Amino acid sequence: MSNKEQVLKELFPEDIMSISKGLTEGEVQFLKQLDDLLESKYRKDINQHWTEATIPEGFFEDMGKLQYFSNPLLFEGRENAKTTSQLFQFFMSYVLARFDVSLVTLLGVHQGLGHNSFLFGGSKEQVAKYVPKLQSHELRTCFALTEPDHGSDVAGGLETGAEKHGDKWIINGSKKWIGGANVADVMPVFAINKETGKTACFVVRPEQEGVDIEVLQHKIALRIVPNALITLKDVEVSEADRLQNINSFKDIAKILYSTRAGVAYMATGGIAGTLRATLDYVKQRKQFGRPISQYQLVQEKIALIQGNLAQAMAMCAELARMQEHGEYDEVATSAAKMMNALRFRESAAMGRGITGGNGILAGEYDIARFFSDAEAVYTYEGTHEINALVIGRALTGESAFV
């Protein structure tokens, strides 16, 4: 057995379809480093951070030091590539989500939605100014699109508006559920250009006059992620800080399509975390004089979770292959997000059921985190129903959104 095969066996014992064999030696080495970091530094206190709704100190900095955008390990054998492989991106999200869904969500908002807003939406000069610092984590960002009264209907329902006065823009409105806004250095804020009626995007800084950020309290899921309500009152932004290549919702959709696959990846990692948490529990929990892992009904449910995971991993691998070739297909990404999030929700419920009353103790047992977080993944980055309607429209040729 080669060193790579041995590491993969230890790192992904639940990969019964051997999908991880497609990773390069360098990618496997990087993922092992990531997993070791999570387990050695953050495992002990992760449940406490979840219950107390706090971000583990140093996590964002540690991820920046890993250089997951540009680490030479990720380009071995593909030196002419401009980005890391899509299969690697799947497994990086998977490893993080298997550990904790809040942490992968927090990073996903930064590296996917936020970073891609600048990468896809910025001019050549804006990309050069912001993207390297976002990739190194010198700057933090978020994604300020959704609003208090507009989530699924943001394509035609933004109320936040921007009016141009000379070379300045004045923005008024509010944004809700913005993950990481309170720790961001730069926020891409989407608003309606009052003159054209089209969507535009502006780089806003939290410390600017007229910007108020309130962290939402009492969440039952993704508690480590600080979601915020942003209020903008006569906020002044220069034309130089308008992202020049975002001029309609179609431009925003490109960002969403590119990151929706990432949510499918996260959901799959969540299933893996559910399986691991459930197995850890049943092997040590005794009832009626023996470990509950020896009971048939328990094994049947664990087998279903493993089956859900294998199917989800296979769908992610195929989606990664498509996107590696530039096929950012709306229906494919919606199907992957919808089904993998559904299977995560189903698996977490089975795992929680197996663990009984202990499964609702988030401070002591990992399964409670995954059970709660599955509800958020089921809803965000396009609800189950919205993704179903995207697929249904493609199948029937009829739009049923309204």
Image (cartoon, rainbow, N blue to C red):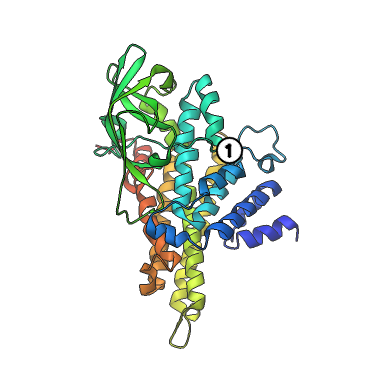
Q: Quadrant of the N terminus?
A: bottom right
Q: Quadrant of the C terminus?
A: top left
Q: Residue at x 46, y 62 (%)?
A: 274
Residue situated furthest top in the rendering: 166
- Quarter of image, res 149: top left
Could you tell whether 179 is left or right of 23 in the image?
Answer: left
- Quarter of image, res 391: top left
Could you tell whether 355 is left or right of 230 in the image?
Answer: right
Of residues 145 and 22, the one drawn nearer to the viewer in this rendering: 145
**Residue 64 locus on image (x, y percent):** 57, 42
Instruction: Indicate whether 342 appears above or below 319.
Output: below
**Residue 244 locus on image (x, y percent):** 44, 20
Q: Residues within 10 Å of mark 1 (few under 14, many from 20)?
A: some
Instruction: Indicate whether 247 appears above or below 75.
Output: above
Residue situated furthest right in the rendering: 2
Query: What residue type is disc 1 on?
Result: Glu
Of residues 273 and 141, the one drawn nearer to the viewer in this rendering: 141
Under tag 1, what secondary structure? helix
Q: Residue at x 43, y 32 (%)?
A: 186
Could you tell whether 118 is left or right of 82 in the image?
Answer: left
Of residues 349 and 19, the one drawn nearer to the viewer in this rendering: 349
Check disc 1 and report the residue beneath it.
324
Instruction: Indicate whether 44 appears above or below 324.
Output: below
**Residue 345 locus on image (x, y percent):** 39, 58
Q: Is residue 240 in sight in this rendering?
A: yes
Instruction: Indicate whether 322 appears above or below 32.
Output: above
**Residue 372 locus on image (x, y percent):** 37, 59
- Quarter of image, res 398: top left
